[in-house]
Image (spheres, rainbow, N blue to C red):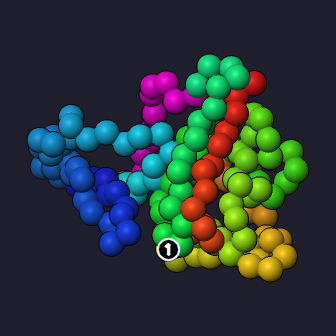
Amino acid sequence: GTTIELFSSTGFSTVVTRSAFSGAWSSNAPTISIPPGAGFMIHGTSAFTNTFVGNVIPNPGATNSMALAGLTLQLIGSPAAYDGDLTSATNNGPNSFNLGATLPKNSTIQVWTPGTGFTLAATKNAFSGVWSANPPFTVGQGFFVKPGSATNWVQTIQ
């Protein structure tokens, strides 16, 4: 009974399902690839632990760069296995989450709150560029971002 959904500008669409009877995943499951940094929703029928495997971090000195379209709501997550607060100085630059300083003025971030759904977590003021809040993010957490203009989220590994 588990489903996995991806988000596009028109909303969520179910991409794979797991049968509540046989436990088998839908036939398209082997062809679905979710790239590093893409957010998605998993709806399970009970609590479970999901283990991610693969190589998502570039070699030391290399970078992850994710293009973010301006004024478009996007479900994303950190392409590198980083956590951090949105605006803390220690979470900007190499080896860090590096999102708060990257996003332009007039950007918004929404996070999932169980029982409530997606709620506004922070807004970057259109004039001063100051964030309204400093929410924390964990490794593997997805969230909605709507940049005030097109930008690239860059994370450098040192």
Amino acid under label 1?
Answer: Gly
Residue 48, percent from left and from top? 42, 45
Q: In this view, does 136 lie to the left or right of 113?
A: right
Question: Where does residue 32 sit, x and y in percent of width and height?
Answer: 26, 41
Asked if residue 153 lies in the magenta stretch, the reply is: no
Q: Main secondary structure of the magenta part?
A: loop
Query: At numbered mark 1, what does the secondary structure look like: helix, strand or loop?
Result: strand
Q: In which quarter of the image is the C terminus?
A: top right
Relative depth, front residue between 126 and 3: 126
**In the image as oriented, which residue stretches furthest toward the top?**
59
- What is the quadrant of residue 42 in the picture? bottom left
User: In which quadrant of the rendered image does the N terminus lie?
Assistant: bottom left
- Please provide percent x and percent y for residue 26: 15, 45
Magenta region: 47-57
- The answer to whether any part of residue 136 appears in the image is no
Which residue matches tag 1? 117
Q: Which residue is drawn at 81% across and 58% down?
A: 87
Report if residue 55 lies within the magenta region. Answer: yes
Looking at the image, which residue is at 80% across and 80% down? 127
Is residue 98 in view from this perspective? yes
Q: In this view, does 64 lie to the left or right of 126?
A: left
- Asked if residue 154 lies left or right of residue 14, the reply is right
Toward the viewer: 85 or 79? 79
